[in-house]
Image (spheres, rainbow, N blue to C red):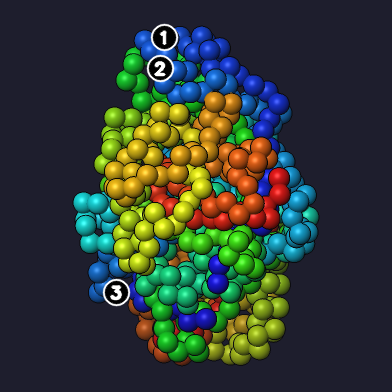
Amino acid sequence: MGAIILATGISTDKSVKSSIDHAAIAAKQCIANAKIKAEDITLIINNGNFRDSNIVEPAIALLIQKQLGINLDFIKANNGKDAFGLDLMNGGIGALNAMKIADAFLQSDFTRYVLIVGGDSHPSNNNPADFPYTTVGSAILLGKNADPKRGFQGFDFKSEEFAGQGRLAYFEAKNMGADGRNRLTVKSAPGYIPAALKLAANTARSFVEAHKIPTAKLTLISSQLDAAFAKGLGKEIGLPSAAAMDLFSQFGDTHSSTFGVGYHQLQKQGLTKPGSQILFVGAAAGLDSGVAHYVSS
Amino acid sequence: MKTRFESLGIYLPEGVTLMKDRVGAMEVPPPFDLEAITGIQQVHTASKDEDSFTLALAAAKDCLSRSRYKPEDIDVIIIGSITRFTGGALRNFTFEPPLSHSIKYALGAPQAMHFDVSNACAGMFTGVFLLDRMIRAGTVRNGLVISGDFITPIAETAIREIVGATDPQFGSMTVGDSGAAVIIDKAVDDEDCIDYYEIMSCAEYSQLCLGMPSDKSEGMALYTINAEMHKKDRIQLWPRFQLAYYQKNGRHITTEKFDHILHHQVGSRAISNASKYGSEIFEAELPKSSLSVVEHCGNTATTAHFVTLYHALKDKTVKKGDKVLIVPAASGLITGFLSATFSNLKV
């Protein structure tokens, strides 16, 4: 292991409606905070799920890459620099999958920096009341660290089957008329959030036990499916009551941006000093869960 | 360390639509011969009960049926479809949860880490790229990349909405439905491996091809500014990228001794132009054997290279020990190169 978080950025301005714009604003802030050359970023992973106008091609990551101006044309730039962007979709835990991928790329020197961006908007960009997610953006820049005791120490992912898959989000292509660019249906099954909490807690608890991670000083950055989720999850994992970051009261459910927003807030509070122990725990429809252990550098 | 294509499976729906019938159904027929330009005589079309998920599942089962791995041995499952239709005739375009969650349970691989990727026609290549690097890094042992692209709904929209010879929906007339799946694992020797694989997105051109619901009628649509998308400069991003790699690594196309080249199956003329423009940059001939099934399958989007490779292995165009230069291409604009040698891949 050894991938470390070099910088973060978030975009929370309510006047911004587009998930692409939010992600790009967050990414620009993140790159500026990292004080690196953007052209040295060679892997861009967007883990947002919900897209402006229900765009399904190209990858949203590439529309973000364009706004960032990162290695846009290999021939015209004529500097030998290239980048690859992709969308990784896995509900609220896609960022954890992206971190595991980034860790592999960085460990093996396939790349110098990996940029992970998140952001979800209702396709209409109008934020209707039945859209359960807050439209914000986040960005995390990962780089390599020589010290194996710093950075990401391990990951685990576990799933289970659940009635109605917990939550389904789709647009009905056979019942959308000419308004498909503005349509989205989100259906939550009864008992989804408690079941997602239980699965995530089990995944995290068994991970913590298996890796003998001391819980006394852990900070928990988790999915925030409702106002009580983070605190309840922390309790189920067996963490001290102050360990769980409450992001919901300030931001609501920021879904694909949650881990970026959480780490950014932690940094602002001065709680990412070298050696700080962080547990990222995600819960998502499916049901799916993921956990990552991170030690600040 | 290198990786390899350990197993390959495909699924083509039984239904077939002839290009002449598709063109004949257009409300405003084109002033040119689409079949002659594209070389596409027919495409496969899914039945009303099929969708992206069922196409993907059928291909994955086919792939696993010839693999040395059982579902419970798979570390990672990645779905790379453009289309995300579930619910059969309902055509629910699903964003959450990922299709990979349902498919791993349908296959009996609940232990696998899973996620979907979306990257236009390079969705499967994106999955292969991530797995190639993760396996080489030693963080996973193997993985299954799957796509089910129920893509012909965009043709239905194009048939209704195309109004002129330069309409941005003409590309939609070339697509066919399919599924494909590959298992990637660690290579055991150089006779059967992915020798090298690089891919990039030149996002300057990310707005030249957009897929989204139509705002004119009910249906999914794809809008491509063809004159810009298929410009020589755009096509030559690939050989320039590959040439730069060779210059850095002391290689040359002539010493690579490729037996075949495999382009994206967008149409016979486009395939031939890609090799021609590539030769100009390499200042060398590219393999005369350009693998293609475009005549009978059309452009099957994310699965196109894999459907073609399957047929080339099946009819023994690709023989034991043959080396193939595979060139991904997709909206975004994505291009790259993958050098693979095939010795043990059974279809």
Tags 1 and 2 touching, CB below 8 Å: yes
Q: Which residue is mark 3?
A: A34
- Residue placed most toward the observer, A209 or B104: B104
Q: Which residue is mark 1?
A: B28
Residue A99's x, y, as percent? 50, 69
Quick check: B72 left or right of B199?
Answer: right
Q: Which residue is mark 2?
A: B162
SS for dot 1: loop
- Residue placed most toward the observer, A227 or A139: A139
**Three-letter code, disc 3:** Ala
**Res A185 quadrant in image:** top right
Question: Could one spot residue B84 in this view of the protein?
Answer: no
Q: Chain of mark 1?
A: B
- Residue placed most toward the observer, A275 or B260: B260
Earlier residue among tags 1 and 2: 1
**Three-letter code, disc 1:** Val
